[in-house]
Image (tube, helix red, strand yellow):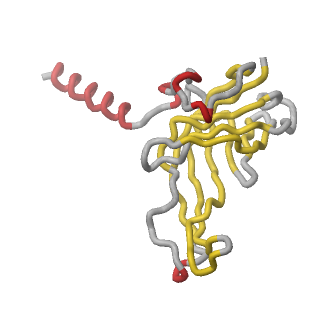
């Protein structure tokens, strides 16, 4: 009876752990496994790997130069950046897109390329970092990749004149890989 109870408890605990991915399950990325558009140029090495988990806000707006058509417009992200052990090491927010380490150093970046991800997920992305503000982990970061994206796409809810200005928040997760020049 005791063995059965212990076995049942272990099964429930293991099943519960499998339902929630952890940063420690994050894998290193082989550039050759990624689409060419989001590969980091030669001469750079991985400096830090993080998992970003948080939200993206969208707002219903009229399409540019098309006042009678509407779309969900990307307003900005707000996510925690965690290391492999699940410890928060920084934050990602915007606009402008900003990656900030807990040590106070931070970078903004300019998008270089995107590549489609799984259905229902924001695209993979490669950005070129601007010079870091502050001294710390972000000092010397040259590129940032967003890979292994989950969720984050614009809401499926209709966007039109009746809900113009409405905001919707969607959840997402992605791995952010930081590179520095060798």
75 or 33: nearer the viewer: 33
Rendered location of residue 131, percent (x, y): 85, 36
Q: Give the side of residue 132 with respect to residue 81, left or right.
A: right
Outermost residue, left side:
1
Outermost residue, top side:
182
Rendered location of residue 137, percent (x, y): 77, 28
Q: Give the side of residue 26 with respect to residue 103, left or right.
A: left
Above or below — where is 146 with respect to 32? below
38 or 169: nearer the viewer: 38
Which residue is rendered at x = 79% and y = 39% of the image?
107
Q: How many marks?
A: 0
Above or below — where is 53 with respect to 166? above
86 or 54: nearer the viewer: 54
Rendered location of residue 182, percent (x, y): 78, 17
Which residue is rendered at x = 55% and y = 32% of the image?
35
Rendered location of residue 174, percent (x, y): 55, 39
Which residue is rendered at x = 57% and y = 52% of the image?
55
Q: Quadrant of residue 113?
A: top right
Which residue is rendered at x = 23% and y = 23% of the image?
6
For the N terminus, the image quarter is: top left
Q: Quadrant of residue 99?
A: top right
């Amino acid at each position: 009876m005791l063995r059965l109870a212990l076995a049942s408890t272990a099964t429930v605990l293991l099943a519960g752990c499998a339902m929630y991915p952890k940063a420690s399950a994050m894998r290193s990325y082989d550039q050759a496994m990624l689409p060419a558009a989001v590969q980091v140029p030669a001469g750079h090495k991985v400096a830090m790997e993080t998992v970003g988990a948080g939200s993206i806000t969208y707002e219903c707006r009229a399409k540019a130069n098309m006042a009678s058509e509407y779309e969900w417009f990307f307003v900005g992200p707000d996510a925690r950046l965690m290391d492999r052990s699940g410890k928060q090491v920084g934050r990602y927010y915007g606009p402008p897109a900003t990656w900030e380490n807990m040590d106070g150093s931070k970078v903004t970046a300019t998008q270089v390329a995107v590549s489609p991800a799984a259905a229902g997920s924001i695209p993979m992305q490669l950005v070129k970092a601007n010079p870091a503000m502050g001294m710390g982990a972000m000092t010397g970061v040259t590129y940032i990749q967003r890979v292994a994206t989950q969720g984050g796409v614009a809401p499926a809810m209709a966007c039109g004149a009746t809900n113009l200005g409405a905001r919707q928040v969607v959840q997402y997760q992605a791995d952010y890989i930081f590179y520095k020049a060798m």
